[in-house]
Image (cartoon, rainbow, N blue to C red):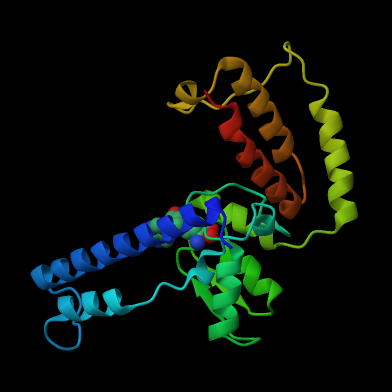
Amino acid sequence: MRGNLDKSMEKETFLMFFAVREQVKIAIDMNKRYGLIKLAGQNNMSQVTTLFSKTKIDYSWSFSDKTRKDTAYITHGYHRYPAKFIPQIVSRLAEKYTKKGDLIVDPFGGCGTTLVESKVMGRPSVGVDINPVAVLITKAKITPINPQKIEKSFIALKAKLNTYNKDTKVKVSEHERIDYWFKLEEKKKLAFIFNEISKLKDQDIRDFFYCGFSNILKNYSI
Ligand SMILES: C[S@@+](CC[C@H](N)C(=O)[O-])C[C@H]1O[C@@H](n2cnc3c(N)ncnc32)[C@H](O)[C@@H]1O
């Protein structure tokens, strides 16, 4: 029997289905107007809408039984990211359409869900993203680091951070929008953390901590 959560997810799936259908209509209209893509056959619009109206919704793709914890295993929960998909979608698609050793490419890789799952499933992968923060997160999520090395660095970093007090002199970034996002005290503390991370010698460890740093920024902004 389905609970209330499942019901609302079903509704969302329906809404998504209709939204996708609308997007397809718009894409076909644009294509007719500008001739960007050559689609096979005439009357594509009706072909596609007929196909969509006959397509039965497969609710198993909603993964409505999955909790936040289920979707944040291994490194998936390192960093929040807008519109990321859940790893279960990637692993199911990879299972269905690829075999061990096949190359998987995600040209809009975001925070690296595809690359993490590909690694777990023994598929080499390539991710591309226009956003440097997405690239940083992905790198932190797929780069293995010796746990003892990272623990040692973390203990040393924490000791440095504990030396901070309100009189600590900090070089703060001069970005034109920074005062819009952060109050002075938060700005100083964050700059202090950032500067200490920047001093770490090992680049993989530095990127790992930059990733954690980036993930806390939203909590400290106005
Ligand atoms: C919805 S997110 C992908 C999320 C990803 N599926 C995940 O789970 O993390 C879409 C990504 O496409 C990237 N993007 C948008 N336009 C792009 C472009 N022209 N080239 C490369 N990446 C682009 C955005 O920066 C964003 O990270």
- Residue 169, percent across and down? 70, 16
- Residue at 18% in and 71% down: 28
- Residue 4, percent across and down? 53, 51
- Residue 173, percent across and down? 55, 27
Classify residue 186 by image quadrant: top right
Please state if 165 lies on the left or on the right of 85 as rendered.
Answer: right
Q: Nearer the viewer, residue 82 or 19?
A: 19
Q: Quadrant of the N terminus?
A: bottom right
Q: Nearer the viewer, residue 182 or 67?
A: 67
Q: Nearer the viewer, residue 20 or 8?
A: 8
- Residue at 38% in and 76% down: 56
Classify residue 74 by image quadrant: bottom right
Q: Is residue 162 above or below residue 84?
A: above
Q: Residue furthest top?
A: 167
Q: Quadrant of ligand 1?
A: bottom left
In this orientation, does residue 130 appear?
no
Q: Is residue 203 above or below residue 51?
A: above
Please state if 47 lies on the left or on the right of 129 as rendered.
Answer: left
- Residue at 68% in and 43% down: 212
- Residue 215, percent across and down? 62, 41
